[in-house]
Image (cartoon, rainbow, N blue to C red):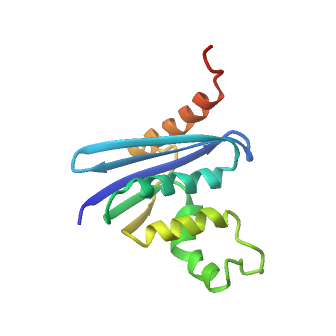
Amino acid sequence: MAVVDIYTDGACRGNPGPGGWAALMSIAGREKELAGAEALTTNNRMELTAVIRALEALKRPVRARVYTDSEYVRRGILEWMHAWKRRGWLTADRKPVKNQDLWRRLDELAAGHSIEWHWVPGHAGVPGNERVDRLANQAIDAMREPTAR
């Protein structure tokens, strides 16, 4: 089974506000960058979207190492999701899980792969993390630039 390293990040200017996401996928010396933006979103939605878009880009089951600076993503998938699902996608205080649409999609996609989830500190010089941070912010900038006429 192929091993893919995936770095992901989300960015938001204001929360909510314009946001961007990015992923860097690396396998056998080849790299692929993915990025996008939304006009009105939250940082957590962009963090989740980055991982979702990376997993959607995989064409077959793989072993993946996902690196994220989001404890929300890492802890959500590793610690909280099982209980959310058991409670019908409700939190411990019986409120609907925020970003449930994205969590459900992530759960569906992750099931097809063997994934190790790693937290990395943001803005601490981790090359893959720094790169996806730049890409996510560039995606916001590109979305906000007026189109050439």
Q: Where is residue 95 in the image (x, y as percent from the top left)?
A: 78, 75
**Residue 144, picture quadrant:** top right
Q: In the picture provided, is 47 more to the left or to the right than 124?
A: right
Residue lying at 77% horizontally and 80% vertically, measured from the top left: 93
**Relative to residue 80, is residue 10 depicted above or below?**
above
Q: In the picture provided, is 43 more to the left or to the right than 93?
A: left
**Relative to residue 34, is residue 83 depicted above or below?**
below
Residue lying at 71% horizontally and 65% vertically, measured from the top left: 98
Q: Where is residue 24 in the image (x, y as percent from the top left)?
A: 40, 46
Q: In the picture provided, is 125 more to the left or to the right than 11?
A: left
- Identify the image quadrant of the C terminus: top right
Residue lying at 44% horizontally and 68% vertically, measured from the top left: 110
- Identify the image quadrant of the N terminus: bottom left
**Residue 45, picture quadrant:** bottom right
Q: Position of residue 34 (x, y in %)?
A: 44, 43
As drawn, which residue projects farthest toward the top?
A: 149
**Residue 81, picture quadrant:** bottom right
Q: Where is residue 3 in the image (x, y as percent from the top left)?
A: 27, 60
As drawn, which residue projects farthest toward the bottom?
A: 86
**Relative to residue 81, is residue 149 depicted above or below?**
above
Q: In the picture provided, is 50 more to the left or to the right than 43?
A: left
Task: Judge by depth and name the residue closer to the eye, 109 or 127.
Answer: 109
